[in-house]
Image: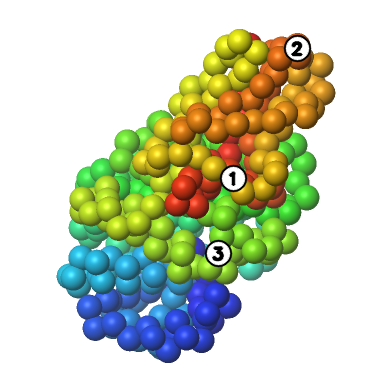
Amino acid sequence: MEWSADMGITNGASEIEQASCSSLRIFHVPKQGADTPQTDCRAVWETASPQSMRRTSATAYFFARYLTMHLQVPVGIIVSAWGGTPAEVWTPAEVITEDEVLSKNKLKEYPWWPTTPGVAYNQMIYPLAPYRIAGCIWYQGESNHRNATSYARLLSQMIHAWRSDFGWDFPFYYVQIAPHAYGAENNTPALLREQQQIVLAQVDNTAMINISDLVDDVNDIHPRNKRAIGERLASLAMERNYGHFTQAYESPVVSSVEYEKGKIVIHFQGNFSKLQWEDSVIEGLVVTDARGDSLNVSPKIRGKRLIIPVKDEVGPFRVSYCFDESSIGTLRTEAGIPVFPFRVKVH
């Protein structure tokens, strides 16, 4: 979320040049930690300009710019971000230390950003409460993949703590981590994406977007098209909070799976009409049989259903889609929005 235009984004020079916007204000919180909760974060409101835009979160800027253009009202964004930090530092320390699971997680130490629970929360979140924010956008998770299996627990508790501070259950919208070649053990990036999706079922008034289609290089952990990311988040907020559909943003998610007459049928739900793919095969789709052997399948699409013939093969079957660290799938909606990664077992 911290990544700025100065750090390198798609069409960066022209975006900076066009950043003046009198109806957009930016409150950029300096990167600083504290051992105890603070009452001052030492920041000021600035009008959006090439100077202020280029050094703040590009995703947040494009999100706010989209809102002010479509709503025709002034918009202010509070940017509190520190790239590379784990979610523990944004969560009250006692939430971590008093939890029997979270307190046992081991965080990798780095010399250039904090890993102690609560330190960013104390200086960069606590002083902002109880300012009446309209909602929160969150773009983080890569640094938590080593402890992936507890991420849903961690993020859920962080959201609850923030909502308690701010005094209401504000919308919390976030970005699923993008495909990247981590070289990780035990497929932890895929497990973290799965955990991010679990949060949607655990915490009300949350939503998530998929940005896998915006990745140009899986060796770069930072997708550079921050405008598209910010505007996808803004389109989500425009519909969920303001009742205006402006453009497609919602990724299909698996709703049910069944086996019938030699076929695996996977049903998807979401605001779209049909699934599609352009290549001869669906990149990222893996089907295995009872022995764990991969099958050569010829899937078909019927509206919101993916049909996979497996006649004469022995189940139970396992079907996964982009359930690894860096696959960029080709299964999309008619508007080009990518399907969320998944894994299912079919009897």
- Real-space Cα separation, disc 2 to disc 3, in angstroms: 50 Å
| Image side of residue 247 versus residue 215, left or right | left
Q: Give the side of residue 22 with respect to residue 305, left or right.
A: left
Q: Position of residue 238 (x, y in %)?
A: 27, 56
Q: Nearer the viewer, residue 324 or 216?
A: 216
**Secondary structure found at label 2:** loop
Amino acid type at circle 3 is: Gly
Mark nearer the viewer, 3 or 1: 1
Residue 220's quadrant in the figure?
bottom right
Q: Is residue 43 left or right of residue 12?
A: left
The residue wearing badge 1 is: 277
Is disc 2 surrounded by few (<14), some (14 to 19) or many (20+) residues within 10 Å?
few
Mark yes or no: residue 91 visible: no
Q: How many marks?
A: 3
How dense is the environment of label 3, judged by Cα within 10 Å: few (below 14), some, or many (20 and up)? some
Residue closer to the observer: 154 or 344? 344
**Residue at image x 31%, y 41%?**
205
Inspect the image, locate mark 1, and give the three-letter code of the amino acid beneath it. Answer: Trp
The answer to which of 190 and 148 lies nearer the viewer is 190
Q: Earlier in the sequence, mark 2 or mark 3?
A: 3
Q: Which quadrant would residue 45 be assigned to in this image?
A: bottom left
Whether residue 296 sits left or right of residue 89 in the image: it is: right
SS for callout 1: loop
The answer to which image quadrant residue 157 occupies is top left
Q: Which residue does the numbered mark 3 point to in the structure image?
A: 83
Q: Are marks 2 and 3 in contact (CB under 8 Å)?
A: no
| Label 2 with label 1: CB-CB less than 8 Å | no
The residue type indicated by label 2 comes to: Asp
Where does the image place residue 68, in percent across and percent down from the top left?
Answer: 25, 70
Numbered disc in front, either 2 or 3: 2
Q: Residue 141, relative to residue 313: is it above or below?
A: below
